[in-house]
Image: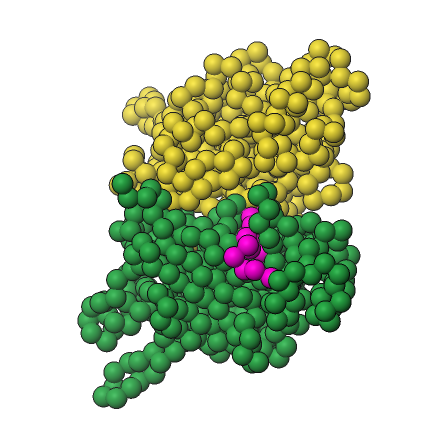
Chain colours: A yellow, B green
């Protein structure tokens, strides 16, 4: 099934069930008012949501209305945990190279993961508000999962059973704040402003056989100012699957219902083109990668980070060509409007 | 006023108002069922809680019962944000020295802060469950605040106005997992298991003139296996006050109601004793500090980290000698009981 959260002026919004084709929706009032409530009591509440979803798809839901992604908050407008992995080796290698850092020797056995802020997420069409353009504004196109309760010490297989929902994310990064912040040794904080999520969160059965091995085997599209810059396969080059990422997170603590765990920027390996020049035909899911590609190709980056007024659109289509999650589509906006 | 959360089998527990002397309590049912609810709508709900608090202190609350800290969850059993600073230079200098790392040059102007997990907090008497003793189990005695909404770009003075409640925390650390984790560059994750909080959260007026300059000028007591090891002044050596810590956090994003911001391990400067030997007469708030002190004094650490069955007690007394927050008192317990 597909779930979204409509803005209603409150901090948590109103849970709605959305039809498979994203055409219609229905308030889940009477079943659960908020998505966190459904996640807290999933075994009891999700079958009721599923019944409403089935009725909606059959055109039999009594109070259905046209679904409008512009009215959406993030499916979870705030969450108790947001932990983002970096599961694509190509991304890690490219970005670290761009900032002169090493790929950790342990990467192949031990995922990179950082703890993000989860108190103030952005809806799919909310502006990305940044105080200063020169901080180096970048998008990051990601696939993320929402978990149920996963016990401390769970194996990757057990952890994978804890996946409840899948979404897309734009993990906005302020690239020029990263080097100084990481040099302090405590990880990202100011360099990771509020993250945005897709209009809709979906259960894994919606993905059919595109969900296998704990990965989403579909193409993640990224457009920057209306131009497609990435058509990246989210499955094939994901070095750690979501069960492994969750198991990494719960090695020393319980992971509780409603935790969001991310893949990191979806990224595919380069190929050797004419004359031995490396090429990345599937494009990129963040500008930092593009700049790293340029550095490898030409010795220096030529693409600049985002400017105020720029837009980014992130979407994933199913094998039937229809949008699975709806589109993230955001504009970069200054914190203080120019005088 | 003083607020706590009683266990009731649910994820968020039941909000109770606790008398100033921690002797009696009263369910806040009818005002707010959960602390997050009160924080979400503080201006409306807190005066009602205050009325109940006043009645309770006067012995006029109709359904008061004896307060029992063993029935407490963390005041916020789960939160949308937990960001922990490291505001005591002495702690940073000692601990970094112990693991052979530098104090960042920027420390005096730019606080160290990491994003912690906030989906699964421990109550004040809950056991600290750890899978392996050899991970180097340590306590960290801290003062923390709970915020209201603080806007992106707020000044330290504006941010300080956003402080709603003060608590104590035991920010449990797995010392032997830290070096490898920080070397990866993404900050703490597995090395910081679930954090525990004091039985009671208090509004700043409860601290009287001990709350000044955004700091708590009282002594934080730490006992390890029943022996007092720290009597640290939480005010005098705090290099960044809570307004500065919150302002650091909200430089690039909004901080939303119910965010918890911590001081880091409370720590006081050493003094030169007989024969020029450095001494720390106020003791320590984490074992890593004690080991660093030993290294400076004797060339190597002699105190080992906590073992299964060890206990830690963290408490702060007011100028009247009474416990302000109630005591954190926890035992270290193995994840899998020995066969």
Decide if residue B33 is in sight here: yes
Decide if residue A190 is in sight here: no
**Magenta span covers which residues?**
B67-81
Q: Main secondary structure of the magenta part?
A: loop
B317 shown above or below A186 = below
Extreme right residue here? A63
Extreme left residue here? B299
Query: x%, y% of residue A185?
Result: 38, 55
Please tell me how many numbered marks the rendered image carries.
0
| Front residue (pair B252, B15) | B15
Query: x%, y% of residue A118?
Result: 56, 45
| Front residue (pair A222, A203) | A203
- Residue at position x 71%, y 16% from top? A56
Query: x%, y% of residue A216?
Result: 47, 22
The image quadrant that residue A94 belongs to is: top left
- Residue at position x 65%, y 67% from top? B19
Residue A336 colored magenta? no
Q: Quadrant of the image for the N terminus of chain A? A: top right
Relative horizontal placement of residue A330, taking residue B132 as reference (left or right): right
- Residue at position x 79%, y 18% from top? A62
Q: Quadrant of the image for the C terminus of chain A? A: bottom right
- Residue at position x 29%, y 60% from top? B305
Relative horizontal placement of residue A85, taking residue A18 as reference (left or right): left
């Amino acid at each position: 099934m597909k779930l979204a959260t409509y803005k209603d002026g409150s901090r948590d919004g109103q849970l709605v069930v959305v039809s498979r084709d994203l055409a219609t929706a229905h308030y889940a009032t009477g079943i659960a008012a908020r998505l966190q409530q459904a996640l807290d009591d999933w075994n009891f509440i999700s079958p009721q949501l599923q019944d409403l979803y089935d009725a909606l798809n059959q055109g039999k839901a009594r109070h259905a209305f046209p679904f409008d992604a512009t009215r959406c908050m993030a499916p979870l407008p705030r969450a108790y945990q947001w932990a983002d992995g970096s599961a694509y080796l190509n991304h890690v290698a490219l970005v670290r190279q761009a900032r002169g850092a090493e790929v950790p020797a342990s990467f192949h056995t031990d995922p990179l993961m950082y703890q993000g802020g989860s108190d103030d997420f952005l809806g799919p069409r909310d502006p990305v508000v940044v105080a200063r353009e020169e901080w180096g504004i970048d998008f990051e196109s990601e696939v993320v999962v929402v978990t149920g309760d996963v016990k401390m010490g769970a194996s990757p297989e057990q952890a994978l059973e804890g996946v409840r929902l899948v979404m897309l994310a734009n993990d906005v990064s302020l690239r020029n704040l990263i080097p100084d912040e990481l040099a302090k040794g405590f990880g990202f904080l100011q360099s990771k402003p509020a993250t945005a999520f897709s209009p809709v969160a979906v259960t894994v059965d919606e993905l059919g056989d595109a969900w296998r091995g704990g990965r989403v085997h579909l193409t993640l599209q990224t457009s920057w100012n209306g131009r497609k810059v990435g058509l990246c396969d989210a499955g094939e080059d994901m070095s750690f699957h979501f069960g492994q990422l969750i198991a990494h997170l719960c090695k020393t603590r319980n992971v509780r219902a409603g935790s969001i765990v991310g893949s990191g920027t979806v990224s595919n390996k380069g190929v050797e083109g004419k004359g031995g020049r490396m090429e990345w035909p599937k494009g990129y899911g963040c500008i930092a990668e593009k700049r790293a590609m340029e550095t490898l190709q030409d010795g220096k980056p030529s693409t600049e980070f985002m400017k105020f007024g720029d837009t980014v659109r992130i979407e994933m289509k199913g094998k039937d060509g229809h949008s699975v999650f709806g589109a993230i589509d955001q504009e970069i906006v200054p914190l203080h409007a120019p005088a």
